[in-house]
Image: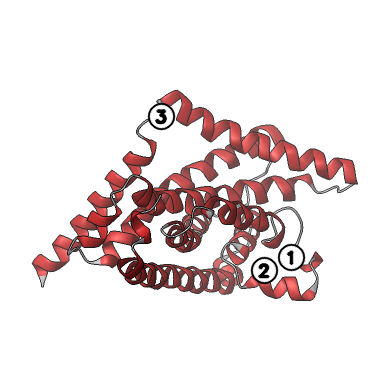
Amino acid sequence: MRNHLSRNLRLFFIGSWFSFRALFFWMTPSAYISTKLVLPLFLMLMFVFIARFVGLGNELYIVVGNALLLTTRNGVFGVMVTVSGERYFRTLPYLLGSPAPRIPLLLGRTLFHTLDGLATTTLGLIIAVLLFGLDLSQTNPVLFGGCLLLLSFTSTGFGLILGGVGLVSRQVWVYANFVYQSLFFLCGVNFPVAALPPWLQIVSYSLPMTRGIAAAREVIAGAAWAIVSPLIFGEILTGLAYATIGYFFFRYIEKRSFIDGQFEAI
């Protein structure tokens, strides 16, 4: 039992590290850092200027929302490319043919993207403080850090689902971009969820990120654990649900691919 657990943990961490390196090892440190800095800045500037053009006054609401949503790029695109890239680089037959347990093999793909998403959001918040005057003096740092880590994790379920789609479809980037762009107006990033039509509010609260972003906003405003705990527990349940769906969807695609051989097609 102990050896079995040790082997699974080793597979989880080492597999996670090598899959992350395979995705970003070609980038120079300067290119990687500039991507982390330039993307948050211009996303914030774009939505802030749109808000000024249409007459919306609460620019900090937009800045904070966009900083918090930065984790989704890693969770959605990073995990999706890591999983679906196995097909593109023709390593998928070896992955599916290995006797390795699927849970640590797949969930390990999300670990470093979760940490990388956390780092990206942290940089986005630093930009928000320095350029837009975001006040974090009332923020509980431990509780806020927990919210950021949770947001980094919950978006990876989307990435696993889209990664499964990428194993059998060439149009996965179309789906991924649609999902990512939808989050900007469904998850309370640039305006409150209450501004959406009732049926879209139902869709919003069925997605990861919505409750996590709301909880992080409350913590920035000085809210304590008792106030944000329902939002945090709801976010945890939603994230686990999407991660579970992503796992079982991958297993379904795996079984299907052995029948029709699509995993070997580019």
| Residue that badge 1 annotates | 193
Of circles 2 and 3, the one toward us is 3
Q: What is the three-letter code of the residue carrying label 2?
A: Ser
Q: Quadrant of the N terminus?
A: bottom left
Q: Residue at x 82, y 45 (%)?
A: 51
Label at residue 27: 3
Tell me whether circle 3 and circle 1 mark residues in contact (CB < 8 Å): no
Inspect this view and state whether residue 221 appears: no
| Residue that badge 2 annotates | 204
Q: Residue at x 59, y 42 (%)?
A: 125
Label at residue 105: none
Q: 148 or 185: nearer the eye?
A: 185
Q: Position of residue 264 (x, y in %)?
A: 33, 54
Q: Decide which of tag 3 and tag 1 comes sooner along the chain.
A: 3
Q: Position of residue 2 (x, y in %)?
A: 10, 68
Q: 100 or 42: nearer the eye?
A: 100
Q: What is the three-letter code of the residue carrying label 1?
A: Val
Q: Looking at the image, is 38 positioned above or below residue 262?
A: above
